[in-house]
Amino acid sequence: IDGPLTDMQREDLESIQKSGKHLLSLITDILDISRLWAGKLSLDLGEVSIPKVVDDAVEMAAPLIGDKPLALRRLVAPDLPPVRADEKRVRQVLINLLSNAIKYTDAGEVTVSTYRQDGRVIINVSDTGIGIPPEYQEAIFEEFRRVDDSRTRKVDGLGLGLSISRRLVELHGGEMGVESRPGEGSRFYFSLPIDGPQQ
């Protein structure tokens, strides 16, 4: 396109870019879940700085807020040791939790917090969003499952992100779960063994 873009052209290009990113995300999720089902997804283990991963994930997720009156906070314990893990996969899990929290929170805050406990690092993503009914709190970790609610149907996705995230955490020897109250918000958490997965 020659010359400066009109507002309409800019909006069209932004829409195309957004759609492209969404499609790429769906393809990546399908490839990941296929590898996990086949037992062919391996971890690239190394020494990982959790504060750095948190900073990276928050920076990547922040644009998703758009014009929502939403604060994105981080509370990272200063004494966290490096963790033996796959940095790319840990970042993927954290970005998934952050993007979900932002999608389902119209106002208030999303907070990432970390601490050390019994040879593990615990990472929490808390929000002040719509919350999850008790009967769905385990089902949302299954493939292609989403909360069947009028407030959630407008959000794009296949329902694979949480399933993939939990499996990736379990490959590391950790655990993932959720605590939530409808109308008040949710806290998703996962643990990573500091020494990495046991062989």
Image (cartoon, rainbow, N blue to C red):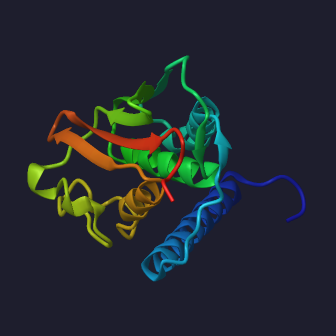
Q: How many marks?
A: 0
Residue 80 lies left or right of residue 14; in this view the side is left
* Above or below 108: residue 120: below
Which quadrant does the N terminus fall into? bottom right
Residue at 36 percent across and 64 percent down: it is 163
- Relative horizontal placement of residue 10, taking residue 32 as reference (left or right): right
Residue 15 position in % (x across, y down): 59, 61
Return the x and y of residue 97 as percentages of the image width and height.
Answer: 42, 47
Quarter occupied by residue 150: bottom left
- The answer to whether 117 appears left or right of 46 in the picture is left
Which of 180 and 35 lies nearest the eye of the viewer? 35
Furthest residue to the left? 135
Judge by depth and name the residue closer to the eye, 61 or 3. Answer: 61
Residue sitting at x 41%, y 62%: 167
Picture residue at 38% right of the left edge, 35% below the top: 124
Q: In terms of depth relative to the viewer, which is nearer, 113 or 118? A: 118
Percent x, y of residue 51: 59, 29
* The residue positioned farthest toward the right in the image shown: 2
Q: Residue 165: image x %, image y %?
A: 43, 57
Residue drawn where x is 90% and y is 62% of the image: 2
Of residues 49 and 137, the one drawn nearer to the viewer in this rendering: 49
Q: Quadrant of residue 178?
A: top left
Furthest-front residue in view? 199
- The quarter of the picture where residue 130 lies is top left
